[in-house]
Image (cartoon, rainbow, N blue to C red):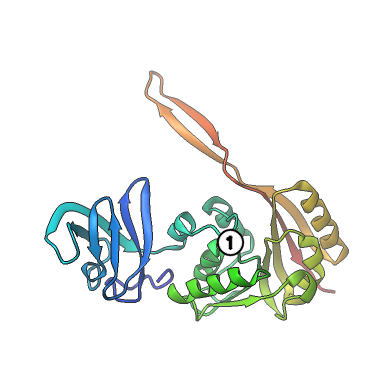
Amino acid sequence: MIINSGKRIAKAGDTICIYEGPTRSAVIRLEFGGLYQCRFGIFQHEDFIDQPYGSKIYGRNKKGGERTKAFVHFCKLTAELWTELVPHRTQIIYASDISTIVSRLELRPGSVVVEAGTGSGSLSHSLARAVFPSGKVYTFEYHEERQKKAQQEFEEHGLSDVVVSAHRDVCTDGFEVENANALFLDVPSPWLAVEHAKKALCDGGMFASYSPCIEQVQRTCDQLRKHGFVRVETVETKLYDYKILHRHPVLLSGEYIDAKTGALVQSELRCG
């Protein structure tokens, strides 16, 4: 669903986003006989099935009951919406950092990208969309239960042909992937995986890791230079919320958004 942009009608088995208002949305998987309950009433899954995405759906006062005047809208699940609504099994990476990561890894349709630290799968969905339709995302998670849950969500969201999920500690066991175009690490000790990353990447492959602490950044940069990576850079994405003050003359006021963020270490592998 996240990467099938041509689909316009909701079907049983689809995962959709229900929009209740600016401050509340929800993700459900449609199935015959299913119910969704919220402050606007009871919604049978059949009310959504075979309806165009973007439709307004009116609630019911009880299962099988009369329609009420209260309603919700529903839309396709996108990578950005999943990032906002994903159940947090771990701390996740948000859209501002995701856009930087995808850009600096130079991902495009057909790319092969490796991810270590699947976590809640927030970034994995955006990686899958970036390399679709002929690319692959190999994503590894050292926590077995988290990996199983993420794999289930990939299947439910229609990503099985693009995303390959596995339970593995890449810092000790490596990746068992070769000639990847890009590799991303979101693990506690990324410097321990740099040697394995070199084996997984092709010549000219892009490397990036995401770390909240400068000590992690320093140790990772040292290992990258030791193993022949070039163009080692560290960046941080900051968001500013600009507000226009309606005065004469018009003033523009900026305020930093204190969002959860970290430092992105980027490099390129050059062989020979």
Which residue is the site of mark 1?
A: 102
Q: Residue at horizontal 69%, vertical 66%?
A: 206
Mark 1 Cα within 10 Å, few/some/many (few <14, many 20+)? some
Label total for image: 1
The quadrant of the rendering that contains the C terminus is: bottom right
Is disc 1 placed on a helix, strand or loop?
A: helix
Where is residue 233 shown, x and y percent of the image?
74, 53
Q: Quadrant of residue 141?
A: bottom right
Given residues 10 and 148, the one toward you in this image is 148
Would residue 245 be found to the left or right of residue 226 on screen?
left
Q: Residue furthest right?
A: 226
Q: Residue at horizontal 41%, vertical 23%?
A: 250
Where is residue 121 shown, x and y percent of the image?
55, 65
Amino acid tagged 1: Val
Given residues 254 and 119, the one toward you in this image is 119
Given residues 249 and 138, the one toward you in this image is 138
Would residue 173 be found to the left or right of residue 251 on screen?
right
- Check the image and report above or below for 94 versus 147: above
Q: Residue furthest top?
A: 248
The quadrant of the rendering that contains the N terminus is: bottom left
Where is residue 262 shown, x and y percent of the image?
66, 49
